[in-house]
Amino acid sequence: MIPKNKPELHRRDVLKDVAAASLASAMVPFGFHAQAQDLGPASQTPAPTANPLIQEENAKVGAKDWQLTRVRLDKTGGLRSPPIEGYCSKQSVQAGEQLEFFVSTDPIQRFKIEIFRTGYYSGRGARLMTTLGPFEGRPQKLPEVGDKRIRECEWAASASLTIPDDWPSGVYLGRLTTESDSTGAGYWQNYTVFIVRDERPADILLQCSDNTWQAYNQWPDGDSLYTHPKGGQGPWGDVSFDRPYGKYPQIFENPQTFGSGEWLCFEFPLAYWLEKHGYDVTYCSNSDMVTPERGLKCKAFISNGHDEYWDIRQYESVVKLRDAGVNLLFLTGNAVCWVSPYRNSQKDIPKRILFRGGPYGGEHRWAELREQEHGPFPHRGPDEGYLIGARNVEPVNGGGDWVCTNPDHWIFEGTGMQRGEVIPGLIGWEYHGDPPVDIEGLEIVAEGTALQGGINPQRWASTIYPGPKGNFVFNASTIWWCQDLASPPGHWLPWSHWSRPHGPDDRVQRITHNLLRRALA
């Protein structure tokens, strides 16, 4: 609900005729059990509508081999894998549209592309959709450092694919594998990543945080929004989607991050868990939310993982979703922090370059502090607290326990949680705090202290407030929420600031079921 003393903020057809099956019959009644169990929704409350599309897809045979096995760095401490690396022509694509793959191999060698859709698939985590190739690979030119220190590839397309009509929405990985090289050293692998979206009405729209994946991407040699010689956080750097994703440079040394952005690190456990339980979920890129139409066809919108960089049009779209009655779940931390306008690539392809245009925060002190620290910016966005229910604070990174403070709230039904009970290590490595006190009906459901570097304290807060049409906005206040939902193949638990999440926890699973049942009722 918009506070009364604030101005208004900028703000189902496929298979719906198939009888939807209740999830409840397939799930064990929920109580408080060991952390490793995921027992599903409680039988005494309405279960979400299962989607035949998701159920039928996940009943198909999953792949036994879809992860990266052999990767090779260019140097000790390097970020790229020259034997094979590549990127896609679009962040997201619909059935019937063409996607191009740009691949470089050094030395010259043949390679294939195996396309996998990530999901549950009886616990295997992905399904092989098709194999392309083999193709003749060759080295492609490393881009020069351009204006605003951009590294923008102009590679020749190596392969293309028209997305089949029967491919469901989801996050897809293209596993690039070379044939054995001339030295007999064996094959090398890397990923590309893309999203297949659709336009069908759905219960849940899960937005991937790929703007943030790209902002932190340091391919080829330390080139991200954080590595500019003028300083790590200013409007002087550009990043392009026309380049491979290098190894993720923070939190852990995980070879699964080559080419996959931050999907396997910080977001895949939520998708795996949703599909395990048959939730009616569809997927989109940050770039698909510059207009609200996709979200307005859904009952719930989820921001997942590390969703820091938003074009102002994304913000306006999500405000419109809330005001139209869509439920918003920020299962994330550090969300909606930086205004990041899109612009066209040098080939005039829309939404392929972004930069840090300025802070969200309006006239709030946190926005002012960020400008004092990093200099003037050409853009400033509205106060994100009036959308999320809490703000990005300073310091915004650290770690700690998620502490229940309002156990009588309906989100805790069936968890058995008591006031002061903790979920260990769930806060991190960035979070939200400082809730706006004038949002009517806002409640703090959990709060506590995170420590930056194990030393510097900062208050965080998990909140929920009512929307204008019986909907709600929930803020989990941590990037690591999905770490406690599932631990799928290809995923490693992160750590940071002398703190770490512990993995699947039935309390987090139950809270999330409670939120979704209410959102989808």
Image (cartoon, helix red, strand yellow):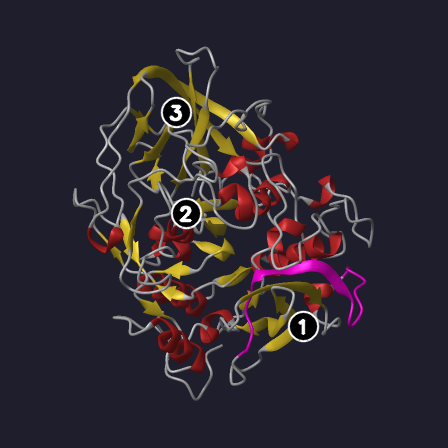
Q: Is residue 272 visible?
A: yes
Task: State which tag comes first along the sequence, 1 or 3.
Answer: 3
Q: Residue at left 38%, top 66%?
A: 320
Mark 1 highlights which residue? 448
Q: Would residue 415 be counted in the magenta stretch?
A: yes
Q: Is residue 370 above or below residue 145?
A: below
Mark 1 is surrounded, within 10 Å at the Cα level, by few (under 14), some (14 to 19) or many (20 or more) other residues, namely many
Please tell me how many numbered marks the rendered image carries. Answer: 3
Mark 2 highlights which residue? 284
Residue 221 placement (x, y as % from top left): 36, 43
Which stretch did the figure color magenta?
414-435
Q: Is residue 206 left or right of residue 354?
A: right
Residue 362 tag number: none
Residue type beneath disc 3: Pro
Residue 83 tag number: 3
Instruction: Please identify the quarter of the rendering in which residue 73 is found.
Output: top left
